Image: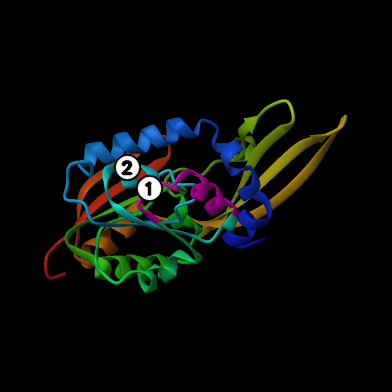
Amino acid sequence: MNSAKEHYDQHLGAIYSWMVGNENAALKQNRSLFRQIGLDVSSKGLAIDLGCGTGFQSIPLAEFGYSVVAIDSCAVLLSQLRERADILSMRIIHDDLLNFAKYISDQAQLVTCMGDTLTHLNSLDAVHNLITEVSRELVDGGILVLTFRDYVSVELRGHQRFIPVRSDGTRILTCFLEYYQEFVEVYDLLHHKVGTQWVLSASSYRKLRLDKNWLIKQMSELGLAIVRDTFDNGMVSIVAKKIGNA
């Protein structure tokens, strides 16, 4: 079992863009979400993208006029982001997202932590500490946008735990889930064709079973008022605003 960083560095990072497939569609989806929230017309300032990956959040935010600090622990993903973001207002940081505060000198207008990044943290305490730090570093009225996969409300069983992710003529990626009380062990099984032979490479890491209601309670206690709470295709999406004097 690897950490999330090791899993991405040694296994998933190199095929991440292929795994996602239509990257333009992912960018379009986030542009649409951010417009629904009103981020395209709100006052622009500093935006922090935690677990930025290849830039599915960072790029739309920079296009909207934010000064973006994009942080991720995977160098492979960040190298792809640098190729795409050279003309945008963006500072790209290679580090653990828990260290984000040391890279900023001013409070942020906006913080995003999207995809499934939150579940990559190693404990609920780490999630709570991150949300605490985010609340501290947001301006009054600042916005926090979170998304993560729901591993709590439904537990897949038997063959349902084998999930086909993507395939083509030379690669087949399958995900297998093994449920425990506090986390899910995620196995990414990649078959790739070498000549006429199929070769298997596999790696696993843990994802937190993060309960939405628990998270909302933590956020509310930290002065983050929930303004949007949706669920779509297995993904939880939460938008919160920092209340003054929190």
Residue 141 visible, this angle: yes
Query: Is 20 placed above or below 128 here?
Result: above
Identified by mark 1, the residue type is Leu
Position of 232 with respect to 37 (left or right) is: right
Residue 209 visible, this angle: no
Extreme residue toward the right, this view = 196
Give the number of the mark in front: 1 or 2: 1
Q: Position of residue 28 (x, y in %)?
A: 38, 32
The structure residue drawn at horizontal position 44% and vertical position 49%, both measured from the top left corner, is: 152
Disc 1, disc 2: CB below 8 Å? yes
Query: Is 94 placed above or below 160 here?
Result: below
Q: How many numbered badges does the structure rendering display?
A: 2
Q: Kindly identify which numbered label has been placed on residue 88.
A: 1
Judging by the rendered image, the residue that carries numbered circle 2 is: 63
Residue 2: image quadrant is bottom right
Q: Residues within 10 Å of mark 1 (few under 14, many from 20)?
A: some
Task: State which region is magenta.
Answer: 76-90
